[in-house]
Amino acid sequence: MNKLSFENFNGKAQIYAQTRSSYSNNYLNIFCKHLVSQTDSCVADIAAGTGINTKLISKYCRLVYAIEPNKDMLNQCRKNCQEIENIKFIEKTSEETGLPNKSVNIITIAQAFQLLDLEKTKKECQRILKKSGKVILIWNSKESKNDFFYETEKVLLQFCPLYKRSIHVMDFKQSSFSNFFSKPPEFYKFIDDGVHFLTKTEFIGRALCASYSLPKSNNNYNAYIDALDHVYDKFSVNGLVYAPLSTIIYVGEI
């Protein structure tokens, strides 16, 4: 992850941990399918963030390295995973993890792959993976073909210069990352696989914890919150808004 990208998460760790969804059982089933064994598998969770994926997979592995370059996010990851003994926390980037050569069976990258320097990340993944090791990419992907999404996106385009649809709302296909994998990866899309209804607090929190979102110090912050409030009020029913997620997964060798 380049310096600009991971510094964009400064000050957002707590709200990220409070409002972002975990990953589905469909993902866990696929993850476990590729484990060498529950007693021997070592996993590098790159761009671990606040540890949502790290914590989820730790019960199935011998050891998980939570690798995260943003100090705030890594500290929140430590807090969220403080009672789990088989996690090691490492303040490093995807380009330089600090792990030994050929040391991990699986690399997971959850929700962050599109923010990384893919050429340098690929070289580092090749260095630390054991023979026949796998890279698993995972996203909770928002449904982007409805009026609620379009109205929310208008707000992001108005207030958030870092927001780019090509990066933050991707059109996932099996061929999307063909240059990263050595051969076509396994590709899975589970539609309506995640949380479906959000409170206003959850909706605004998810917007605020995104890498592109405005910080409180920005002069337009209050106007940005007001605009998000307006969108939520327009589409909510009985204090909830319908916001489905699909699970996107790639599994392959590099």
Image: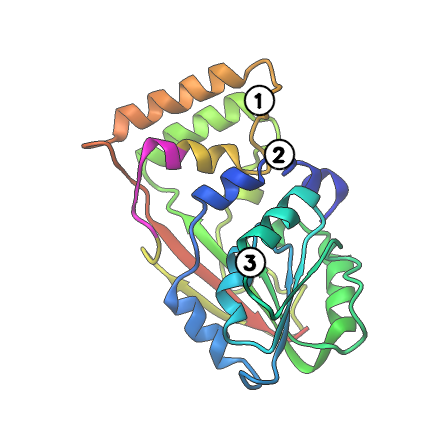
Residue range (magenta): 195-203
Secondary structure found at label 1 = loop
Q: Nearer the viewer, mark 3 or mark 1?
A: 3
* Amino acid identity at mark 1: Lys
For marks 3 and 2, the one nearer the N-term is 2
Indicate which disc, 3 or 1, sits on the residue closer to the N terminus.
Answer: 3
Magenta span contains residue 196: yes
On residue 216, the disc is: 1
Residue bearing the label numbered 3: 81
Residue at figure coordinates x 76%, y 61% from the top left: 97
In the image, taking residue 65 as reference, residue 128 lies left or right, namely: right
Residue labelled with disc 2 = 11
SS category of the residue bearing label 2: loop
In the depicted structure, whether residue 203 falls above or below residue 109: above
Q: Along the line of sight, which residue is nearer the eye, 81 or 238? A: 81
Q: Of callouts 1 and 2, which one flags the residue occurring earlier in the amino acid sequence?
A: 2
Name the amino acid, label 3: Cys
C-alpha separation, residue under disc 1 versus residue under disc 2: 10 Å
